[in-house]
Image (spheres, helix red, strand yellow):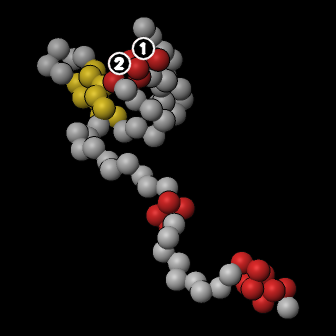
Amino acid sequence: MSTILTVKGQVTIPKPVRDALRLEPGSAVEFAVNAAGEVVVRKAGSRRRAPRRDRFEAARGKAQVKWRSDELMALLRD
């Protein structure tokens, strides 16, 4: 597999390599040069990030509102 280096020094990582490393958009990668002068690409960071909680799910059930919907709408429209 080969790719072209842009004038900005960017390359596209070929899909088979992205798939093998399980890289997704936004994934961090590390580059290294081994003793044989070969470039090694690794998925950066062995730490796993906690799954993001949905912001609405995080807020669900937190409100301490005593208003009923029709009362609140009447107040807001008044």
At x 21%, y 17%, the residue is: 37
Query: Residue 27's spot in the image, x, y percent?
Result: 40, 38
Q: Is residue 76 visible?
A: no
Q: Report the residue that reaches farthest toward the top.
A: 1
Decide if residue 29 is on the left or right side of residue 56: left
Q: Quadrant of residue 77?
A: bottom right
Q: Tag 1: residue type? A: Pro
Query: As rendered, which of 44 and 67 lies closer to the eye?
Result: 67
- Residue sitting at 42 percent across and 14 percent down? 16
Q: Quadrant of residue 68?
A: bottom right
* Left or right of 45 on screen, residue 15: right
Q: Nearer the viewer, residue 63 or 43?
A: 63
Q: Do the numbered discs 2 and 1 sit on residues whose CB atoms are within 8 Å?
A: yes
User: In front here: 34 or 41?
Assistant: 41
Say above or below: 53 vs 59: above
Q: Determine whether the residue tagged by mark 1 lies in a helix, strand or loop.
A: helix
Residue 25, given in percent of the width and then of the height, sits at: 48, 35
| Residue pointed to by mark 1 | 16
**Where 75 falls versus 7 (above or below)?**
below
Residue at image coords 53%, 26%: 6
Q: Quadrant of the C terminus?
A: bottom right
**Disc 2: which residue:** 20
Q: Quadrant of the N terminus?
A: top left
